[in-house]
Image (cartoon, helix red, strand yellow):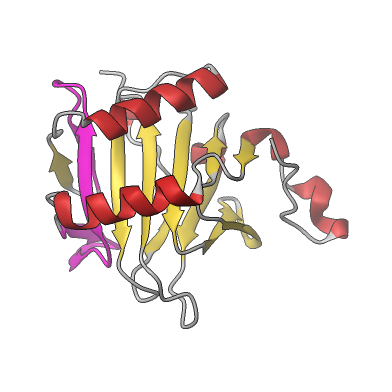
């Protein structure tokens, strides 16, 4: 596990780093390129109309939900029924579970086509995930900035760059006490696929 270098030195003690684990190079560049090529053209991506700040908008990215048969998921006013696990996704899930000792039964794929695609501030704190969910995030393709802000004080903002092939584990009360986002970028314009492995509790 790589020591996270998220902050300026005077801020280091303000973010509870036990909420994150970061593993660069979890997926090799060759494997990442193979997954990208296969999934960009082979996944049935959906662009959802989502409830954001009281109104419906098109999500600025494409999504797909995979998992065990009965593991549907609802967020931002949209219900997702799972596609069946593919061989590649099931193998990747198994590798994460072996490395971290956490288990998962579903995964959300997000396809960021270029720097204009993004995800707004949010926490993955839906009822189906239970209290203090563990989420494993695998990033493929274009590296992007991943930012956090503290719910009680939005001026506390920190971030890191998620590299191609990296694995980030989010755990503890992170989803309840912090929000996160991937902002738009004018310079990081390559395609990116992010996979967030989750456990639906219901």
Percent of width and height locating residue 196: 38, 40
At 28% across and 56% down in the image, what residue appears? 37
User: Which residue is drawn at the image coordinates 38% and 50% (left, top)?
Assistant: 194
Residue depicted at x 58% and y 44%: 25
The residue drawn where x is 46% and y is 62% is 182
Quick check: 39 left or right of 182? left
Is 55 magenta? The answer is: yes
Image quadrant holding the N terminus, namely top right
Q: Position of residue 34 (x, y in %)?
A: 34, 50
Horizontal side of 5 relative to 133 (left or right) equals: right
Which residue is at the front of the view, 19 or 117? 117
Q: Is residue 129 magenta?
A: no
Q: Nearer the viewer, residue 49 or 82?
A: 82
Q: Is residue 4 above or below residue 171?
A: below
* Residue 52 image offset from top left, x and y in percent: 27, 61
Quadrant in which the C terminus appears:
top left
Locate residue 71 relative to residue 107 in the image: left or right: left
Instruction: Determine if residue 71 is in view.
Output: yes
Would you place residue 94 above or below residue 49 in this image?
Answer: above
Question: In the picture shown, does residue 181 fall above or below 31?
Answer: below
The magenta stretch is 47-75
Front position in the image: 190 or 31: 31
Image location of residue 191, percent across then percent down? 36, 66
Q: Quadrant of residue 10?
A: bottom right
The answer to whether one can see residue 122 in this image is no
- Residue that extends furthest to the bottom in the rendered view of this protein: 186
């Amino acid at each position: 596990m790589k020591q996270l270098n998220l902050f300026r030195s005077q801020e280091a003690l303000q973010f509870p780093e036990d909420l994150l684990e970061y593993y660069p190079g979890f997926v090799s560049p060759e494997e990442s390129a193979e997954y990208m090529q296969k999934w960009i053209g082979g996944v049935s991506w959906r662009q959802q109309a989502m409830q954001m700040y009281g109104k419906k908008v098109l999500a600025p990215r494409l999504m797909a939900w995979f998992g065990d048969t009965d593991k549907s998921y609802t967020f931002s006013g949209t219900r997702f029924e799972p596609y069946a696990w593919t061989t590649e996704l099931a193998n990747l899930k198994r590798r994460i579970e072996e490395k971290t000792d956490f288990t998962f039964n579903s995964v959300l794929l997000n396809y960021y086509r270029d720097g204009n695609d993004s995800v707004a501030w949010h926490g993955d704190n839906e009822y189906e995930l239970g209290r203090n969910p563990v989420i494993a995030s695998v990033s493929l393709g274009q590296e992007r900035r991943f930012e956090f802000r503290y719910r009680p004080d939005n001026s506390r903002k920190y971030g890191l760059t998620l590299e191609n092939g990296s694995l980030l584990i989010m755990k503890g009360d992170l989803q309840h006490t912090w929000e996160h986002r991937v902002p738009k970028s004018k310079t990081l314009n390559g395609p990116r696929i992010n996979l967030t492995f989750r456990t639906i509790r219901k």
